[in-house]
Image (cartoon, grey):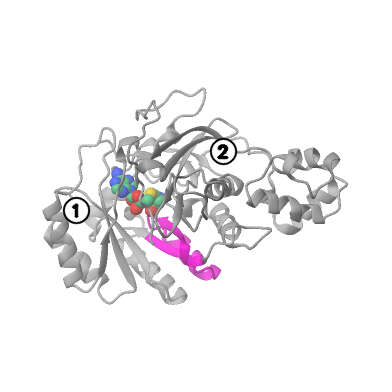
């Protein structure tokens, strides 16, 4: 396995066209006024947009003559469906999206008895180079704009409302930033996305803070910034090793910010929000699943406002690693619990269609640019799929 460089600065590419979801309410009202329309039409447009309507025919509260102008100027189609793949008897759906410049990203909508979660991408590709993650191995194509990130959640909310996911019409309740990309490396756009997810109608989806999870490799300055911002979303830290020596290789950003610093930053976040953070740990056979590492992790987290979420490693193309065997997993859980650390094992469904954590790999393919590696499924596969990426 060749080590990839860490990439912080996303390549600059042509900006997506202006979209309502990139604008504050004031900016949207000004933009509408510039088009010669009364400012309140911005609110009407926003209400339609967040409800998943961009079809002018349905915007009956706006004069017919103005609808197309407003839609063209403020609701350009930023995300085009390339394909959906369903699994888990239709309760899970992965969508491959094409962006205006041909870059590809994926999101995964998962329905449970008590909630519906969408796992969204914040970047096309990722620059964090984690060797066990398909997205990380593909490198960074570019940052997504806020509207491109928000659009994934809006589409999921509309799909739920329209009953496109098995189980009848429902409501999107949770959003996790566990698709492609490192959300805290695209901070400003992710911050704007949080506003839209948590914002109330007409300018937002009205989700609750606890049901939105930002997952990070541990960009310490950005965690601190998030701590100061005053939003209380759930924080997840992708630790994957309790010791610096191993973490330096599994999560290369560790060469810059060490385990101790990451945990300290997460603790400060938990202190401020009063909400425990989640520690993500992909169990990799004979790599990070030894009993002594469970004990180290237990000592690291004992008494902290933290919860460990173990993820059986999802296979990625070209990787020599696989998931820990069940006995090793059980032993790991038992040792953590014995140390007094709340621990759950994430249920990973449907690796078959590459929809589970760390398997999203579409971003390496940009139209007109040859694929780097990573085969993706060619056909719609009605098999169980996964990315159980929820913090519940
Ligand atoms: N960049 C963010 C979001 C990434 S994906 C982060 O690193 O947190 C969400 C989670 O999936 C992360 O915890 C990530 O480490 C984990 N993951 C990546 N590849 C995986 C794989 N092959 N198997 C299991 N989990 C994986």
Place residue 316 in its image quadrant.
top left
**Residue labelled 2 has its Cβ within 8 Å of some atom of ligand 1:** no
Q: In front here: 257 or 355?
A: 355
Q: Which of the numbered marks, if any, corresponds to residue 328?
A: none
SS category of the residue bearing label 1 = loop
Instruction: Estimate the x, y position of residue 90 in percent, counting from the top left.
Output: 41, 42
- Seen at 74% across and 38% down, the residue is 72
The residues colored magenta run 209-236
Instruction: Estimate the x, y position of residue 181 in percent, counting from the top left.
Output: 44, 46
Place residue 219 in its image quadrant.
bottom left
Residue 295 visible in rendering: no
Q: Earlier in the sequence, mark 2 or mark 1?
A: 2
- Say few, some or many: other residues with alpha carbon within 10 Å of mark 2 (under 14 / 14 to 19 / 20 or more): few
78 above or below 50? above
Q: Which of the numbered marks, if any, corresponds to residue 288?
A: 1
Instruction: Estimate the x, y position of residue 195 in percent, counting from the top left.
Output: 60, 60
Read off the residue under disc 2.
Answer: 12
Specify the farthest residue to the right. 36
* Total marks in image: 2
- Seen at 34% across and 42% down, the residue is 385
SS category of the residue bearing label 2 = loop
- Quadrant of the frame with the C terminus: bottom left
> Is 391 included in the stretch rendered in magenta?
no
Q: In front here: 255 or 246?
A: 246
For discs 2 and 1, the disc positioned in front in the rendered view = 1
- Quadrant of the frame with the N terminus: top left
- Say few, some or many: other residues with alpha carbon within 10 Å of mark 1 (under 14 / 14 to 19 / 20 or more): many
- Seen at 30% across and 36% down, the residue is 352
Instruction: Estimate the x, y position of residue 152 in percent, counting from the top left.
Output: 54, 46
Q: CA distance from mark 2 to mark 1?
A: 36 Å
């Amino acid at each position: 396995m060749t080590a990839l460089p860490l990439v912080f600065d996303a390549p600059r590419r042509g900006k997506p066209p202006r979209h309502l979801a990139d604008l504050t309410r004031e900016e949207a009202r000004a933009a509408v006024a510039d088009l010669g329309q009364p400012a309140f039409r911005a609110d009407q447009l926003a209400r339609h947009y967040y409800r998943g309507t961009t079809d002018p025919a349905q915007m009956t509260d706006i004069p017919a003559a103005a609808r197309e102008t407003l839609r063209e100027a403020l609701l350009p189609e930023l995300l085009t469906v390339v394909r959906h793949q369903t699994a888990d008897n239709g309760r899970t759906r992965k969508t491959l999206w094409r962006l205006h410049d041909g870059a590809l990203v994926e999101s995964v909508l998962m329905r449970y008895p008590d909630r519906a979660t969408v796992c969204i991408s914040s970047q096309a590709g990722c620059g964090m180079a984690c060797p066990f993650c398909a997205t990380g191995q593909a490198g960074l194509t570019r940052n997504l704009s806020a509207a491109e990130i928000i659009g994934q959640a809006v589409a999921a909310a509309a799909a739920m409302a329209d009953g496109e996911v098995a189980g009848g019409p429902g409501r999107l309740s949770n959003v996790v930033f566990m698709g492609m990309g490192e959300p805290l490396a695209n901070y400003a756009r992710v911050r704007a996305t949080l506003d839209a997810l948590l914002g109330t109608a007409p300018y937002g989806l009205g989700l609750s803070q606890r049901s939105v999870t930002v997952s990070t490799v541990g960009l310490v300055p950005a965690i601190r910034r998030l701590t100061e911002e005053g939003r209380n979303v759930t924080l997840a830290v992708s630790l994957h090793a309790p010791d610096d020596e191993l973490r330096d290789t599994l999560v290369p950003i560790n060469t810059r910010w060490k385990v101790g610093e990451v945990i300290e930053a997460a603790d400060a976040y938990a202190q401020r929000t009063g909400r425990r953070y989640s520690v993500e740990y992909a169990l990799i056979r004979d790599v990070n699943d030894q009993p002594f590492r469970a004990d180290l992790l237990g000592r690291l987290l004992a008494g902290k406002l933290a919860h460990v979420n173990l993820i059986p490693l999802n296979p990625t193309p070209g990787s020599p690693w696989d998931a820990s065997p069940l006995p090793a997993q059980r032993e790991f859980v038992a040792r953590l619990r014995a140390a007094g650390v709340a621990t759950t094992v994430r249920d990973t469904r449907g690796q078959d269609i590459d929809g589970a954590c760390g398997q999203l790999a579409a971003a390496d393919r940009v139209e007109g640019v040859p694929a780097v590696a990573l085969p993706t499924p060619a056909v719609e596969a009605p098999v169980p799929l996964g990315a159980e990426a929820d913090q519940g």
